Image (tube, rainbow, N blue to C red):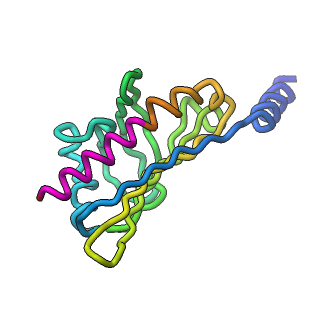
């Protein structure tokens, strides 16, 4: 009976899971190498990053790290995502879960596109999936997206200043 209840719960969660995506982009007047150096200098995040306050651990594909975010006008949270991609000067992504997979999952991605003229298009996005996504939709559309945009602007400011 316990086995059937577990299968029923998993089936229900899978059938009712919802998805949501946030995408932001900014043009930075600096090379991808310069932007990447700032983006991956995790020890300096507390000094400049208004959204991601902490990244701890070895950022390497397959590793779990500790990330602390503080979206504007929202409660901060700490989670332990798994690194999915780490391609120097191009892409960094991770997958995090709230409690367990399927409840509220987020695949966060940073992309650096070399425009070939000394500028970089910086894209920050996240795909959310899970049964709790509808409950957080308003916060994701407002606070989380604002956090992405604030981080993007600050990254641009620092990269263009150096």
Residue 112 screen position, x and y as percent: 37, 64
Residue sitting at the far bottom = 116
Task: Establish if 149 lies above or below 10.
Answer: below
Name the residue at 21% across, 64% down: 34
Q: Quadrant of residue 99?
A: top right
Task: Establish if 133 lies above or below 118.
Answer: above
Residue 74 screen position, x and y as percent: 41, 22
33 in magenta: no
User: In the rendered view of the protein, which quadrant contains the N terminus?
Assistant: top right
Q: Is residue 85 left or right of residue 118?
A: right
Residue 87 screen position, x and y as percent: 39, 67
154 in magenta: yes
Q: In this orientation, which residue lies closer to the viewer: 98 or 136?
A: 136
Name the residue at 25% across, 53% down: 156
Q: Which residues are magenta?
A: 146-161
User: In the rendered view of the protein, which quadrant contains the C terminus?
Assistant: bottom left
Name the residue at 33% across, 48% down: 152
Q: Main secondary structure of the magenta part?
A: helix
- What is the count of numbered marks? 0
Q: In this orientation, which residue lies closer to the viewer: 81 or 143?
A: 143
Q: Is residue 41 left or right of residue 14?
A: left
Q: Quadrant of residue 29?
A: bottom left
Name the residue at 48% across, 30% down: 142
Residue 46 screen position, x and y as percent: 21, 37
């Amino acid at each position: 009976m316990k086995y059937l209840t577990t299968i029923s719960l998993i089936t229900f969660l899978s059938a009712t899971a919802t998805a949501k995506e946030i995408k932001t982009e900014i043009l930075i007047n600096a090379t991808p190498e310069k932007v990447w150096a700032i983006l991956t200098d995790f020890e300096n995040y507390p000094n400049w990053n208004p959204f991601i306050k902490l990244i701890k651990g070895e950022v390497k594909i397959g590793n779990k790290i500790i990330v602390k975010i503080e979206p504007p006008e929202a409660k901060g949270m700490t989670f332990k995502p798994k690194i999915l991609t780490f391609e120097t000067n191009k892409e960094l992504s991770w997958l995090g879960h709230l409690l367990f997979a399927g409840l509220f999952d987020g695949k966060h991605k940073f992309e650096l596109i070399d425009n070939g003229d000394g500028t970089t298009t910086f894209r920050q996005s996240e795909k959310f999936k899970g049964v709790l996504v509808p409950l957080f939709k308003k916060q994701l559309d407002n606070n989380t997206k604002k956090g992405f945009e604030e981080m993007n602007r600050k990254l641009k400011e620092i990269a263009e200043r150096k």
